[in-house]
Structure formats: C-alpha cells, structure tokens
Image (cartoon, rainbow, N blue to C red):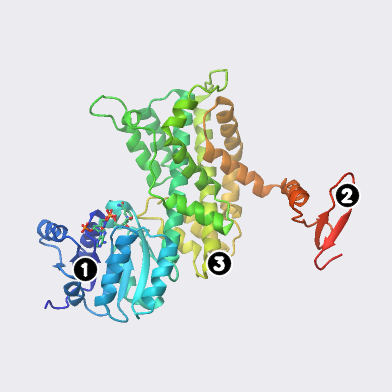
Amino acid sequence: MVDATANIGVVGLAVMGSNLARNLASREGNTVAIFNRSHEKTDTLLSEHPEAKFVGTTTYEEFAASLTKPRAAIVMVQAGNGTDAVIEELTKVFEPGDIIVDGGNSLFTDTIRREKAVRETGINFVGAGISGGEEGALLGPSIMPGGSDESWVTLGPILESIAAVAEGEPCVTHVGHDGAGHFVKMIHNGIEYADMQLIGEAYDLIRRGTGKSPAEIAEIFTAWNTTELESYLIEITAEVLKQVDAKTGKPLVDVILDQAGAKGTGAWTVQTALDLGIPVSGIAEAVFARSLSSKPAQRAAAADLPGPDEAWTVEDTDAFIEDVRLALYASKIIAYSQGFDEIVAGAEQYDWDIHKGDIAKIWRGGCIIRAQFLNRITEAYADDAGLVALLTAPYFRDAIAGAQDSWRRVVSTAAAAGIPAPAFSSSLSYYDGLRADRLPAALTQGLRDFFGAHTYKRVDMDGTFHTLWSGDRTEIESEGSSH
Ligand code: NAP
C-alpha cells in the first residue's frame, strides 16, 4: 500500500486535469495524487514531468490511500456521465469528512443533485467553476467553488495557491453552498458569449463601414485596450485579426468558416434566465447569433433577399470608430448588468449568500472575461450592496450617459445599412425599456384580459380587474380584495 503523502488529488488527466495537476504540484507545500481511467495519461504526465511532486496511482483505492485526511480530490473529467461515474467510484473509497470537487463545466442543477446525494454519505461535494481554459488551468485560473463551509477550510488554501492573482488578491472565493459555484461559472460564460458577440459586431461595422483591413482593425483594438475597454478579449481580438494564413497569405479571419460553435453554457445561462424571469437579452442575442451563423442552408437560401438600396459608406471614419467603441462599452455594461441580475435572482431562488462585489473581483484575473472594468463593478457593490441594477450605479450611469448618443447612432446606422448588430441593438432597447416611464405592457395586459380574462391591475386603485369587452361595453368587474 502507498503512504498517504499527497494533500490533494486530481482525477482525469486530459488537457484541463493534467494542467491543473501541474499547477498544483508547482506550488509550495502541495503533493498531488493523480489518477486517470486509462493509465497511459498518468504515465505520460509522470514521464514528461519527472520533477513534479506527483504520486501516480492506478486504482481508486490506491488514489484514496495516497491522500492525507481529510482527503480532497478535484475531478476534471467529461461533464455528465463521466463525472457521475467518477463520483460513484470516489464515494466508495473516501470517508466522511473527505472532499470531492467537480472542477468540470457541470450544469449547476446537476451539482445541486450530486451535492445532496454525496452529503448523505458524510462526504463533502464541491462544484467548482474553473475558468481560463488550458492556459488558466496551468498558470492560474479564476475559480468559483460552491459546497459546504467545512470543505472550504481545507480547500481554501489549496485553491488560493493555484488561482490567478489580480492586484495582489487570489481570484477565488467561496461563492456559496451546493451549486452556487457552477451557477456563477455559467453566468461568467454567458457574459463571455455577449462580450464576444459585441466585439464581433464592432469589428464587422468598422470593416464594412470603413473598408479597413483586419490588420488595420487589429491596431484599433490594440488602441482600445488602453481605454476603459481594457480586457483579455479585446487584447486577443487584436491578435486574431493580425494573424495571416500561412497557406494563402490572406488574413486568417477571412479563411475561417463563419459558423460559430458552442458547448452549451451560453444556452444554459439563457434557459436558466427564462426560468428565473430575468431578461438577459444581450447574452440571448449572442447565443442566437451563433445559432444563426451555423445554419448554412437557411443562409444560402436567404442570400438574395433584398437589403437597403444604397451602398453605405462612413463619412468621418475616426468619429465612426469612436462611436463604435462607445457603443461597445455601453452594450458591455448592459451584458454585465444583466448577468449580475441573474446572479441575484439565482441566489434568491436557491438561497445562496453570494457577494456580488467578490464575484467581480475573482473575474479580474485568470478567466476569459477578465477586464479592468470589473474593478468598477466591485466598487459599485461596495458602495451599495443592495444595488438594484448595476447600470444605475453612478459610474455606469455616467458611462452610459457619455456613450448613449454614439450608441444610438451606431444602432441606427447598422439598421439603415442592413448590417446585423443584434447585441448592440437589443442592449439599447433593454436600456430604453428599463428607463421608460410607461411601457406598452399596459396594452399587452389589455389583450390578455380580452382573449383570456387574465385580469389586470390599474394605476389609480388597488385590486384586480376584468373588463367585459363585448360590443362597446367597457364595464369593469373587480375581483380579489378591492372593489
Ligand atoms: P474532456 O475531454 O472533457 O474529458 C476527458 C477526460 O474524462 C479523460 O481524462 C477521460 O478519461 C475522462 N473520462 C470520461 N469518462 C470517464 C468515465 N466514465 N470514468 C472516468 N473517467 C472518464 O477533458 P478536458 O477538456 O480536460 O475537460 C475536463 C473538464 O473541464 C470538462 O468538464 C470540461 O467541460 C471542463 N473545462 C474544460 C475547459 C477547456 O478549455 N477544455 C475549460 C474549462 C472547463 P480517459 O482518458 O480514460 O478517457
């Protein structure tokens, strides 16, 4: 039998698991037990990194025996059935007080289910969202763990040792109980979808409006990265646009098929938002824009549908580019504001004590949406923990006030030119909807009452009302407590 020398274990040694195991082993004080279903991956990791403090194991029993108590293992396997299979094996060899961490991209409702089932054995189960892709796993991801307070005592220092560091602080916090971590990771990914879609729309408008080449637009994004838009995604947009295809000598972006893929976390964010009744229109448009792009037959059939008659050219290029930059910033504020609304609604629904300012903090490093602007979100929640809508915080209110003329020009220009800008325009409509004094929802209520007797409320008295709509009778019946 092996000695218990490892303070942390990793199960699943594909790209994410092996990088996370290497990250863990590189930190002072950690010895890492490693296990993979097929032993080749374990052997490869051991032989490629002989210096790393790994304990290679070939059975779940050996894996458990190599861990000090309370045992803690991070599972990095295929989400879904693979995760369930590994949890089942680990619960057979672990003991009450031990900790199983699912670091994969699991749906938060699966995490709630698993946590409940594993808790009955006395073992702690932690769903931890890990963002940053393979590079993040190796060098320092942003980590969003849920699970019990008890598990955080053991896990906290270990996860803090491997997380990215932003402005001196590790990008990890105990998000909340059971599925809270995976819920927040899901919202992170939803915001990532919106952020990328907005960047795509900005690029498309500049390219088609000014005729600039991808390499020239890369320069624009590099310049934008010194403004309030400074972020990882803006930075890598410049890298992608600069890239030249080795085969053809063309800009690489021009030879990449324009059909965007998705692994489902954006759709989960929108599906969950629909269940919670939270409008995340920017994220939804981003998910749908990928779906639309990936319908080649429909796109081919629609290719000769008419657009605007007149060709579109921008008169003042610099002014237009600045308008697009501000439209991007304003729309991005909406996407984050909507994402945080969903976090608030999820926390209420599932009884999680989520500190929104801390979430913004742990997204400042290691993850895909890392951005300078997250400091402003942390500050907004620090100033007012009960902030009802992020975009009403003074900083964001002022930012949108300064951007809105540009934003409106960009959206109307895109519509007139026949260029799709779904995330820009839906974000602007959301903003105008939220700030409207009166909404046509009153008419909607009238229609619902007309065909379905769904009743309505009045602006001038309490109670619930139904109108007898036949002929010219406008008789009002009241229901409920008030007459
Ligand atoms: P993956 O391709 O999602 O999964 C492959 C791993 O799962 C292999 O180690 C495989 O073992 C194991 N596995 C599958 N079914 C199993 C079962 N029934 N029993 C035991 N092991 C099983 O790996 P990945 O790309 O490294 O991702 C791991 C997790 O991280 C996933 O949940 C993924 O969604 C998440 N994630 C990935 C990224 C990314 O950028 N790739 C980013 C964030 C999060 P064998 O080698 O024996 O087949």
Amino acid type shown at disc 3: Glu
Give the residue displayed 49% in from the left and 26% down from the top. 302
Give the quadrant of residue 214. top left
Q: Is residue 330 left or right of residue 55?
A: right
Q: CA distance from mark 2 to mark 3?
A: 40 Å
Q: In front: 49, or 230?
A: 49
Amino acid type shown at disc 2: Thr
Q: Earlier in the sequence, mark 2 or mark 3?
A: 3
Q: Earlier in the sequence, mark 1 or mark 3?
A: 1
Give the residue displayed 18% in from the left and 77% down from the top. 65
Q: What numbered label is drawn on residue 28? A: 1
Element carrying mark 1: loop
Give the quadrant of residue 23. bottom left
- Whole-percent x, y for residue 87 in the image: 30, 69
Residue indicated by mark 3: 348
Q: Is residue 132 above or below residue 110?
A: above
Q: CA distance from mark 1 to mark 3?
A: 39 Å
